[in-house]
Image (spheres, helix red, strand yellow):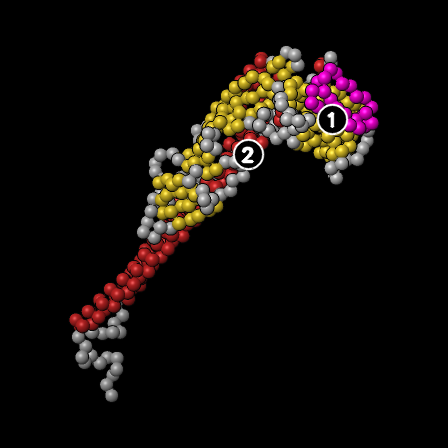
Amino acid sequence: MKKLVNDENAVSVSVGYILTFAITALVIVLIMGSFFMLVEQTENRVSYDEYKVYANLISNQISEMDRFIYSIESQGGAVNSMEYEVKLPLTIAGNYYTVELCNSSEEIIFTSQTPTSTQFRTPYSINSNTEIASGIIYVSHKNHYLIYDNETKMIMLE
Amino acid sequence: MQIFDEDGQLLLAAAFSIAILVLVSTVLLNSIIFTSNIAADSGSDTMIYKNNNLIQATTNAYQNAYEHDIGLNQTYLSDFESNLKRMYAQEGYLISTRQHDIFTPYFTETGMAGGAGDWIVVKNVKTVKNMVFEIESLESLDGTDFEVKALDSNNNINWSISYNGSFELDNVDESFDNVDEIGNSTIRLSNGNDSSVHNIVIRNGSQVTGYYLIEGTLDNSVEYHEQRGKMINVTFNINSARHSTSTTIPISLPFNYSNNEA
């Protein structure tokens, strides 16, 4: 009986190399693929979390403005003008994004400018006679403000 | 070719550990980059509280600065404002206030022309010690009277005063020890009898201007003191690096009825 392990009949070094190379390449491609998938998932998750934080921040600011306007108006006074800076980072998880205030569904919608378009929606609530002006902003380097307009009694994001 | 050749094993182990190191540092670096992106500036803003404090402090100052027959003590107010400016400047806020004209309020909930005309002045009243209503002007009441009523929880009327050019009293003489009508526009009541718990309400207040004072004891033995003399609109501007607000508030000035005797 021939030794099973040390038998080198029909063994070609070059075929061995080619096999090893092919298997290595395959494994590397698989690892890289799963790595990129993992990164993308993390990115989506992080974007989502970040959108949540900023959307809630805006929602909170709208509520504060609304509460203030309500308390002033219930005393018979008037808020002539009100501007509130909203600090938004230029990119979130490395991607540009838009912020939308939607009057009909009473939501703040963050959408990333990526092919997957990660989206986050949070509701806001308004008690006074104030309305929210629907609109969408592309977050850029300039400052963004929540502005109350006494003429139209509307809060808008600019 | 020897499969059991053990040379180079160390190299393999070294390569493996380097690969692990690279993997770990990549994952770590990634999480560091993402964490640094997490919103740091998420604290709630105190601007609204600053605004409310400013309004409260200014309201008190105007009430203290008002002297009957003389008007507002402007020296007091300008001292107050310059101190306030200094105080707020330290926190990064620029403030300014502006006075409008003094006016006679309507008998509405807010004192303004557009306010609710039917409203509750005091709730859960046990006794009324003093009550003064001084009517300054009457606009068209469309056949309805301006009324001040004491209603119990079942909406039964304990007493009521109605006005349409002159006062008409219902069960008032029985409920108060002293009832004085001064001219056709002022009524003073004092030492009300103990009665069932009631609310004092005003009806059709949006067509009548004037002043009132009601004081006495509530059901829970707490003293109450409700009054409204002349009013003044004051505009507040408050600015910081990140905010600006301009608000106009009506401030009710004290009604010094004892100086007002006819």
Q: Nearer the viewer, residue B223 or B27?
A: B223
Q: Residue furthest bottom?
A: A1
Residue occupying image coordinates x 58% and y 13%: B74
The percent coordinates of residue B64 (x first, y second) are: 64, 19
The span shown in magenta is B161-185
How far across and how far down the image is residue B147, in percent?
Answer: 70, 27
Q: Amino acid at mark 1?
A: Ile
x, y percentage for residue B105?
62, 22
Whether residue B56 sits left or right of residue A92 in the image: it is: right
Residue B217 lies left or right of residue A81; in this view the side is right
Q: Which residue is mark 2?
A: A70
Q: Residue at x 40, y 49 (%)?
A: A119
Identify the image quadrant of the N terminus of chain A.
Answer: bottom left
Judging from the image, what secondary structure is the residue with disc 2 in? helix
Q: Is residue B85 above or below residue A67?
A: above
Identify the residue shown where x is 73% and y is 30%: B149
Location of residue A98 by image quarter: top left
Q: What residue would you read off at disc 1? A: B161
Badge 2: few (under 14), some or many (20 or more) residues near its Cα, within 10 Å? many
